[in-house]
Image: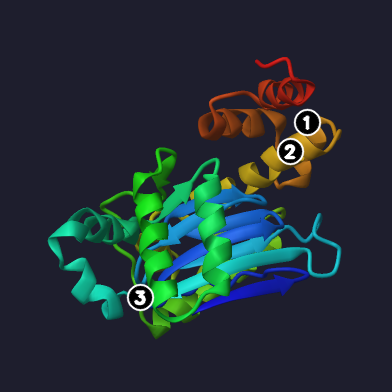
């Protein structure tokens, strides 16, 4: 099953399903959550997600203000229907690759061949669609720029109660991460005491709630450093950091550069002089 999704805005919708998913962002930008991975996405973003890997795309409401600003192409694949093909000796590498997709794959600088086959896939049907899908998976397997999004040790926690709690907590985080958020507030949303909530969140998301919030703040701040001329201290305060020193310290941990170095590197790249 494949479909286009167009919307003014994507809100937090943490979910998972047995089908393997290919997701290509034609336009829009924001935060991509895949298992324990929290990253920025922009137009051209392509990922492959394995079966039952929790995920969500959240667009930046601040910047996405036009109708149908978000446009995403999604392919869901019931891999069970292809199991007889993947068991053939010729497809051993591909079968292993799709198992590894349980940790998620992101593709940098998407190959024109992959984009071409995605476009063809949308227009095809029947046997042609199956053959194109196999060819697309093969190109993804051979892509030199792919990287795994989650650690191989990451094991997602699933279940209706888990899903309900995470949706409540993470929707609140995404609505309020630029403000002060207390752990006891989050625990209350999950109907748990604070200690139990901290263990629960770390087990489900793969990182602490504080780490998760800081990643959201740093990712948004990183984007603002590139697309705006706001002063660095203003960006820090606007994104929930209590001091410039705290912002600088965390920014360097996540980006291996100071905020000013990060901004200069992108300014130089746009000017075509490199860094």
Q: Which residue is mark 2?
A: 236
Instruction: Pick the residue in front: 80 or 100.
Output: 80
Query: What's the residue at 22%, 53% (across, down)?
Result: 93
Query: Distance from label 1 to label 3 (Cα)?
Result: 39 Å
Judged from this view, the residue extending furthest toward the bottom is: 160
Report whether 12 appears left or right of 68.
left
Among numbered discs 3 and 2, the one appearing first in the sequence: 3
Query: What's the residue at 64%, 65% (across, down)?
Result: 72
Above or below, comparing residue 60 to residue 125 in the picture = above
User: Which SS class for mark 2?
Assistant: helix
Q: Nearer the viewer, mark 3 or mark 2?
A: 3
User: Which SS class for mark 3?
Assistant: loop
Q: Which residue is mark 3?
A: 158
Q: Position of residue 51 (x, y in %)?
A: 34, 70
Query: Distance from label 3 to label 2 (Cα)?
Result: 35 Å
Above or below, comparing residue 211 to residue 71 in the picture = above
Q: Position of residue 62 (x, y in %)?
A: 81, 56
Q: Position of residue 189 (x, y in %)?
A: 55, 75
The dot on residue 232 is: 1
Query: Distance from label 2 to label 1 (Cα)?
Result: 6 Å
Q: Are marks 2 and 1 in contact (CB under 8 Å)?
A: yes
Q: Is residue 70 visible?
A: yes
Q: Is residue 169 visible?
A: no
User: Which SS class for mark 1?
Assistant: helix
């Amino acid at each position: 099953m494949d479909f286009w999704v167009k919307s003014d805005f994507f809100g937090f919708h943490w979910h998972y399903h047995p089908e393997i998913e290919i997701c290509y962002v034609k336009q829009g930008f924001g935060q991509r959550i895949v298992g324990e991975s929290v990253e920025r996405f922009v137009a051209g973003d392509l990922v492959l997600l394995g079966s039952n890997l929790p995920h969500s795309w959240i667009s930046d409401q601040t910047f996405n203000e036009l109708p149908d600003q978000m446009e995403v192409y999604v392919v869901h694949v019931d891999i069970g229907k292809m199991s007889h093909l993947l068991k053939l000796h010729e497809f051993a590498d591909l079968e292993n690759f799709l198992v590894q997709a349980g940790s998620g794959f992101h593709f940098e600088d998407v190959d024109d061949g992959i984009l071409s086959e995605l476009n063809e896939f949308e227009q095809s049907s029947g046997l042609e669609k199956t053959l194109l899908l196999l060819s697309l998976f093969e190109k993804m397997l051979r892509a030199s720029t792919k990287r795994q999004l989650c650690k191989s040790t990451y094991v997602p926690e699933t279940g209706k109660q888990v899903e309900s709690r995470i949706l409540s907590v993470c929707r609140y985080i995404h609505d309020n991460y630029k403000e002060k958020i207390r752990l006891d507030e989050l625990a209350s949303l999950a109907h748990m005491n604070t200690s139990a909530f901290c263990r629960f969140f770390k087990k489900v998301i793969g990182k602490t709630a504080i780490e998760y919030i800081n990643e959201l703040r740093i990712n948004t701040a990183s984007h603002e450093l590139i697309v705006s001329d706001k002063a660095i201290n203003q960006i820090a305060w606007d994104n929930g950091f209590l001091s410039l020193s705290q912002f600088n310290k965390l920014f360097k941990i996540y980006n291996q550069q100071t905020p000013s170095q990060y901004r200069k590197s992108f300014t130089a790249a746009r000017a075509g002089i490199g860094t």
